[in-house]
Image: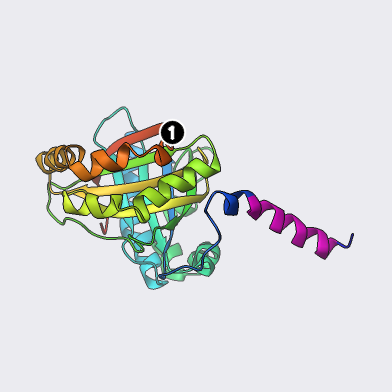
Amino acid sequence: MKRRDFLTASALAATVPMIQQGFAAEKPSVAKEYLELRHYGFASAEKQEAFEEFLAKAAIPALNRHGVRLVGVFKAVDDEESGLWVLIPHNSLESVITSNTKMLADTKFILAGGDILNCPKSDPAYTRFESSLLLAFDKCSKVEVPSKKDTRLFQLRIYESHNAIKAKRKVEMFDRTGEIDLFRLTGLRPVFFGESIIGSKMPNLTYMLGFDDADAQKKAWDAFVEHPKWKKMSSDPYYKDTVSNITNIVLRPSASSQI
């Protein structure tokens, strides 16, 4: 069999199980962002503070110059969850692929961020960072800014599934069955919803919510879990066992955050 024929046959074979389960491939109904979510680790609080300054003075202005808007920078309210989470929304895959090259060719960025970019091996700016690439949902196709209050909080949630079919069903539950709509109705205001394309803890979907303060967060969740639509939706056997593990982290914005 020729290589081209083999690849075509393999691709078709891979789609059969999904089609049989009701997940036939569809053309995107809206223009959706690609979301890179990074988690940086640091050797000390001083290192983290220096990196936050680098993001504010060098990295975020450079990203904005190259068409990336609403860059989010967050740190956990709980001191046990260390590091920084950085959300970078892209309008296209080309932006994802070329962003780093454009940044490193940006003279203003290199000059403004020199201390971090040129740090020695013996004294790195951060220990490492992990990165996930997400495709935004139809019902939350672009990053949103739900609150601008100084007291605002964010909630990052990762829903892992034990197989690809269950993961896709949970996406469907949010995007088509009305869970995101119910979130908005009850005060659970999205920053983003994304299906992981590349990253850890696969398969999963990841989302972030924003609140004016902790009281608003509690009030919204109480309203959601008691809503009759949620009770009906969550009892539907079609969506049983779609989530096998949930990561939940409450965050506050860094001073440099545009969200």
Residue 101, placed above or below residue 47: below
Judging depth in this view, the residue of 197 and 45 nearest the camera is 197
Q: Amino acid at mark 1?
A: Asp
Quadrant position of the C terminus in the picture: bottom left
Judging depth in this view, the residue of 69 and 46 nearest the camera is 69
Residue 41 makes an appearance in the image: no
Residue drawn at (58%, 54%), measured in percent from left and top?
A: 19
Residue occupied by mark 1: 241
Farthest-out residue, right: 1
x, y (%) of residue 47? 37, 40
x, y (%) of residue 10? 74, 55
In-image side of 44 versus 218 (left or right): right
In-image side of 52 versus 136 (left or right): left
Residue drawn at (45%, 41%), measured in percent from left and top?
A: 126
The magenta segment is: 3-16
x, y (%) of residue 84? 35, 43
